[in-house]
Image: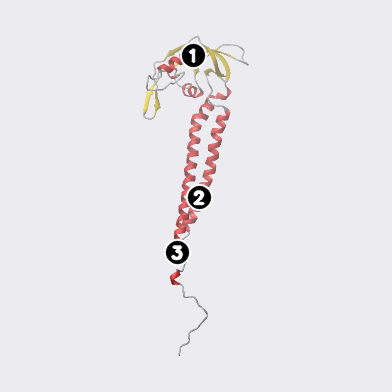
Amino acid sequence: MVSHTSLQEKEKCKISAWFVVSLSLAACCLVALIVLGVVIVQPVVKTDSLSFQEANCTTVNSYFTGEKPSCSCGKYCSSWYPCNRYLVRYVPAAGGNDTARDAVMFDTEGGLNKGRTAGEDLQCATRPCNNYDHGDSELTRFNTTYGEGQTFTCLYNPNDPGFVILTRLFTWNAVFHSMLWPSIGSVIFSALTVYWGLRCKKASSTGPDSSITVVSKNDRPPPYDGGFIYNN
């Protein structure tokens, strides 16, 4: 006799596996949405970097503030870097009135997001982090290009002219796609999680209420050949 129980157990295991997979993928999409929101969307929104326009900058002063912020240089690695503050004077490349303005410079919108609300001693133009020389070599190269008296292209925000950045890391497309695909994935896999959860609940509530009896070959009666036995 072969029972339906084993088949039902296999079906339950398959449903449970799909439930776990869907739940895990939904969680991964949600985590990705949060991480990308912090790394990409938050700096863009807070600094309004999509509104930045091109300008011509000249560094008028740079100095070490005396602060050495700590940083992470990799797995099981921590370091620090000297905080250098850069003051520039810029003229809008287009659409401006050619009036020079003074501003504090940051390398990217991420740096601006961290430094704009910090005190002057923590308005670091760049934040090189390594455990070899604590960013000294990178700061030297940075100062060669953007040091006092150097002129270069920068970006400024007409609505917040007191700060400029060198490079805009994230565009509108980056913001859009960083939110779109994790959101779609979260919705799809959440729906699948609910679906497989209902299937799992239904399978759990269904008991082994039926069975199939398989008659073995040895239990079968001998075949009837149409004859009969006459006893005296």
Q: Which of the image's four quarters has the C terminus?
A: bottom left
> In the image, residue 114 lies at what x, y percent?
47, 24
- Classify residue 6 by image quadrant: bottom left
Task: Tell me what residue is drawn at x 52 percent, y 44 percent.
Answer: 190
Q: Give the amino acid at mark 3.
A: Val
Circle nearer the N terminus (1, 3): 3
Task: Please identify the residue farthest to the right as the structure is shown.
Answer: 95
In the structure shown, which secondary structural element does the residue marked by tag 2 occupy?
A: helix
User: Callout 2: few (<14), some (14-19), or many (20+) C-alpha neighbours within 10 Å?
Assistant: many
Q: Give the amino acid at mark 1.
A: Thr
According to the picture, the residue beneath numbered tag 3 turns out to be 2
Q: Is residue 158 visible?
A: no
How far apart in space, not on screen, are marks 2 and 1 (Cα)? 58 Å
Task: Please identify the residue farthest to the bottom as the structure is shown.
Answer: 232
Left/right placement of residue 127 relative to residue 97 reads left
Q: Which of the image's four quarters has the N terminus?
A: bottom left
- Classify residue 188 by image quadrant: top right
Whether the residues at callouts 2 and 3 have beta carbons within 8 Å, the answer is: no
Task: Tell me what residue is drawn at x 49 percent, y 42 percent.
Answer: 25
In the structure shown, which secondary structural element does the residue marked by tag 3 occupy?
A: strand
According to the picture, the residue beneath numbered tag 1 turns out to be 145
According to the picture, the residue beneath numbered tag 2 turns out to be 196
